[in-house]
Image (cartoon, rainbow, N blue to C red):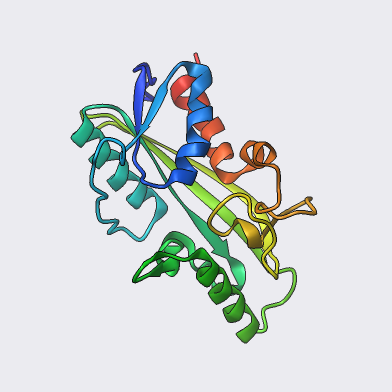
């Protein structure tokens, strides 16, 4: 049975500043304060699953157990059809370097692989987001969202984060990296998943 989120504070099970910026306004209308796992000094659990659902659950349950508060996690990535769905759940891994994450490097890698494979145009792709809300007692709820588009080159725009500069959503003339943040927040994969979360765990 779906559980309603009634607590006044929730932990975002992430150390990603971009995700925190996008998440706080989503919960504000419901009077729910969002604090990050990083601000609470929580560690980052190892993401050992090979699915969005699996890794979202790992992060949310870890943060809920450690903080004693409900926790919401976001496991997301970009799925590129010309690469057989890669990088997918391993999107962040493609950006890892010895000195931190470099998404410019990751975007270049994706484009070079598409070029090497002579992938046909349009080079379709989608952003996927899985949200998991977990409670300290082990209960959780899962919500998915996607936004369709294509990979474009060269990179365009300094707004957003991750793969935003090379993702052109369907029906738009600018990438997520160029798009006004408010517009992006309203149509992103995270927004789609969050609307489902509102219906399932916040509304009513």
Task: Indicate left or right for 112 with 59 as reference.
Answer: right
Rendered position, 57 above or below 80:
above
Relative to residue 13, is residue 139 depicted above or below? above
Question: Horizontally, is 9 left or right of 144 in the view?
Answer: left
Q: How many marks?
A: 0
Q: Position of residue 164 (x, y in %)?
A: 61, 56
Q: Is 161 situated above or below 94?
A: above
Q: Quadrant of residue 118?
A: bottom right
Image quarter where the N terminus lies is top left
Pick the front one: 187 or 84: 187
The location of residue 3, given as percent across then percent down, is 36, 22
- Residue 166, picture quadrant: bottom right
Name the residue rendered at 45%, 67% in the picture. Answer: 95
Residue 181 lies, in percent from the top left, at 65, 41
The residue that appears at 43% across and 60% down in the rendered structure is 89
Task: Determine whether, in the image, residue 178 is placed left or right of residue 38.
Answer: right
Percent x, y for residue 55?
Answer: 34, 51
Q: Residue at x 38, y 49 (%)?
A: 53
Instruction: Name the side, left or right, on which 15 lies relative to 41.
Output: right
- Give the residue at x 35% y 22%: 9
* Quarter of the figure with residue 13: top left
Q: Residue furthest top?
A: 204
């Amino acid at each position: 049975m779906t559980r309603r989120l009634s607590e006044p504070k929730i932990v975002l099970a992430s150390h990603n500043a971009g995700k925190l910026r996008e998440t706080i306004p989503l919960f504000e209308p419901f009077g729910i304060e969002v604090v990050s796992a990083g601000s609470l000094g929580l560690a980052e659990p190892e993401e050992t699953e090979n699915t969005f659902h699996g890794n979202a659950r790992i992060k949310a349950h870890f943060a809920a157990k450690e903080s004693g508060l409900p926790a919401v996690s976001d496991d997301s990535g970009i799925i590129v059809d010309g690469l057989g769905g890669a990088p997918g759940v391993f999107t962040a891994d493609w950006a890892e370097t010895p000195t931190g994450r470099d998404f410019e490097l990751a975007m270049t890698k994706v484009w070079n692989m598409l070029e090497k494979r002579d992938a046909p145009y349009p080079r379709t792709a989608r952003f996927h987001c899985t949200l998991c809300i977990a409670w300290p007692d082990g209960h959780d709820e899962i919500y998915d969202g996607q936004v369709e588009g294509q990979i474009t080159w060269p990179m365009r725009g300094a707004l957003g984060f991750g793969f935003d500069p090379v993702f052109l959503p369907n029906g738009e003339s600018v990438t997520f990296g160029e798009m006004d943040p408010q517009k992006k927040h309203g149509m992103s994969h995270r927004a789609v998943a969050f609307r489902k979360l509102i219906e399932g765990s916040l509304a009513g």
